[in-house]
Image: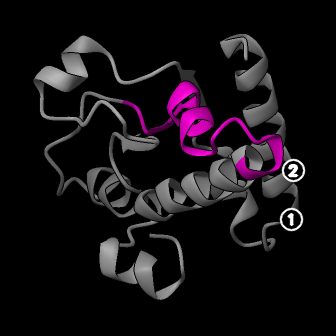
Amino acid sequence: MNWTVLCRRAEAEVARIRATLPPDLAPLAADVPIVCLRRPTREMRADGIEPDLLGLFVGPSLQERGEEMDGGGAGDPLPAEILLFVENLWDYAEADPATFLEEVRITYLHELGHYLGLDESDLADRGLE
């Protein structure tokens, strides 16, 4: 499937998910842009990112942003954003549209969890591994 179509579907699914978030989380989620990429770039892979990764949170977490505002953080040059690797998600879903949307949901919530400061153990406890 065309990656542009996959990106539009992923963005629509993220918008649907954001609309269902609790009122205390919705504005926090809205602050983190979603970026669709086909797959991790060559530079990302050179930095150790696996080529089949489904998503990635980059930039400061909400906690780190709070520390920066309080003057205690070193400052992160990257803005917070969630990267979705839509062709990897499509491949992982074995080209099934419903499974693709489910994987977008799981991946988005997993990466949003990192933004909120949850670690891998916390995410696993919530079924977002």
Which quadrant of the view contains residue 27?
bottom right
| Image vertical order of residue 27 relative to residue 57, above or below | below
| Image vertical order of residue 65 relative to residue 87, above or below | below
The residue that mark 1 highlights is 20
* Residue 109 among those drawn in magenta: no
Residue 16 in the image, given as x and y percentages of width and height = 87, 50
Q: Residue placed at 25% from the left, 37% from the top? A: 50
Which structural element holds mark 2?
helix
Three-letter amino acid code at disc 2?
Arg
Which quadrant of the view contains residue 72?
bottom left
Residue 98 in the image, given as x and y percentages of width and height = 82, 49
Q: Residue placed at 28% from the left, 59% from the top? A: 67
* Colour scheme shown: one colour
Specify the quadrant that holds the C terminus: bottom left
For disc 2, the neighbor class at 10 Å (few under 14, some 14 to 19, many from 20) is: few
The residue sitting at the front extreme is 94
Disc 2 to disc 1, how far (Cα)?
7 Å
Left/right placement of residue 107 relative to residue 95 reads left
Which structural element holds mark 1?
helix
Q: Residue placed at 22% from the left, 53% from the top? A: 71
Q: Nearer the viewer, residue 49 or 61?
A: 49
- Whether label 2 touches label 1, CB < 8 Å: yes
Q: Which mark is residue 36?
A: none
Q: Nearer the viewer, residue 69 or 58?
A: 58
For disc 1, the neighbor class at 10 Å (few under 14, some 14 to 19, many from 20) is: few
The residue that mark 2 highlights is 16
* Residue 96 among those drawn in magenta: yes
Specify the quadrant that holds the N terminus: top right
Three-letter amino acid code at disc 1?
Thr
Q: Which residues are magenta?
A: 79-99
Q: Residue placed at 71% from the left, 44% from the top? A: 100
